[in-house]
Amino acid sequence: MRHRIAVVGSGPGGLTFARVLHRHGYPVAVLERDPAPDARPPGGTLDLHEGLGQLALDKAGLLAEFQALSRPEGQAMRILDADGTVLRDWRPRPDDRANPEIDRRQLRDLLLGPLDVQWGRGVKEVVPEARDGVLVHFADGRQETFDLVVGADGAWSRVRPAVSSVTPHYTGVTSVETSLDDVDTRHPDLARLIGDGSVAVYGANRALVAQRNSGGHVKVYARFRAPLDWHTNLDLADAEAVRSSLPALFDGWAAPVLDLFRRGTAFVHRPLYVLPVSHTWTHVPRVTLLGDAAHLMPPLGAGANLAMLEGAELAESIAAAPGSDDLDDAVRVFEEQMWARAGKWAQITTAGLERLVSPDPTEALALFDQVQPS
Ligand SMILES: Cc1cc2nc3c(=O)[nH]c(=O)nc-3n(C[C@H](O)[C@H](O)[C@H](O)COP(=O)(O)OP(=O)(O)OC[C@H]3O[C@@H](n4cnc5c(N)ncnc54)[C@H](O)[C@@H]3O)c2cc1C
């Protein structure tokens, strides 16, 4: 018996789920709001951990391709003082495959492979207790029924309200992102500062992080504690205004450090929201969540990894569940496993954010030494 299954969202979690089901010969409808794969810029590089994202890719039969595409040297991490002094300069061994980096676009294309995503199919609402299964209402007014709907639709999930009334809350830390292109030719001084991987600078309640992606592209994140409306007198769409006013928040920082940000092209404001640590819900037959939709946490290297492993595990359990009771049992077991693991990571990343954007910048250094002893 083949269940009618839909996954909402074609992020790392939704695509891994669909790809592993596909590997088991199982059809799945992938419903994505974006009108096309490249409708939005894909976001920064992702490090995929051996026991999480890489395990998920193994379950999808894609580990060898990932290893060929990924950048182990991108694990390098340098920490500077606000005056530009190098405090730590950690480089991976040549054979270190623990957390290699991959561009999001490359990961997406790898996962997409033979999948037939339904682009431009934004979901508005999911109603679990319909007569013939779970009813999906689309933004364009159409509707469709499935035996199981998996919400992999990220932070502002439209599937989540079918199982939980909880919504994300602001962490008190916001982020302004920018990027540098062709860094090695256009900004060789900054390329040297960044090295092969990332560079981070920590000050009181603020941090600047620059991360190398492939092809000389660098993403730069300025993170600081501020109320949500900190920018009322600043037009964030006006790049020149942001470029000239943001350095005031990093008063006293050395020019080469500030240049990481000042030479950026466009600026995007992204306040950091999270779901409560250990968010769970009373099981609702025929609907479940995975990834950020289930456990949005601070962006400290776990979210995509967890979403992918959850997608792979749920797909494998479904493929082994022949009847509808088995399907519901498989989802229940999956949820328990997801909640336990995600709860631990939510604690780790929440505590991590407190220390990385802390009144005492030595906290960030201490955390680095704990995680990455030389
Ligand atoms: C700056 C930054 C750096 C990060 N670095 C890392 C890292 O190094 N490692 C790591 O593991 N994690 C990292 N993360 C976290 C990671 O990006 C997320 O946890 C991950 O993308 C979650 O995957 P997902 O599939 O659950 O959701 P998403 O990636 O958010 O994908 C959701 C998809 O659903 C679609 N969608 C949304 N609403 C609807 C709707 N109503 N109908 C249909 N489709 C919809 C969206 O268009 C999107 O395609 C980082 C996050 C940030 C912000």
Image (cartoon, grey):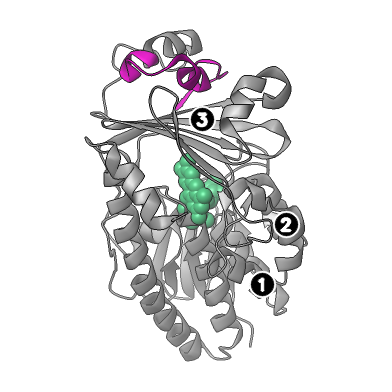
Q: Is residue 219 above or below residue 91?
A: above
Disc 2, SS:
helix
Task: Say what amino acid the circle numbered 3 marks.
Answer: Val
Whichever of callouts 1 and 2 sits on the residue coming sooner in the sequence is 1
Which residue corresponds to the image point at 60% horizontal and 43% vertical from the top-left? 34
Q: Is residue 153 visible?
A: no
Which mark is first along the chain, 3 or 1? Answer: 1
The image's mark for residue 110 is 2
- The x, y position of residue 339, in whole percent, is 35, 71
* Residue at the image position 61 percent from the left and 66 percent from the top: 54
Amino acid of disc 2: Leu
Q: Is residue 109 left or right of residue 332?
A: right
Which residue bears the numbered disc 1?
58
Residue extent of the magenta highlight = 247-268
Per the image, label 3 sits on a secondary structure element best described as strand
The amino acid on which the numbered mark 1 sits, given as a three-letter code, is Asp
Quadrant of res 129: bottom left
Disc number placed over residue 171 in the picture, else none = none
Q: Quadrant of the N terminus?
A: bottom right
Q: On the image, numbered disc 3 is attached to which residue?
A: 220
Of residues 99 and 131, which is closer to you in this image? 99
Above or below, comparing residue 246 to residue 271 in the picture:
above
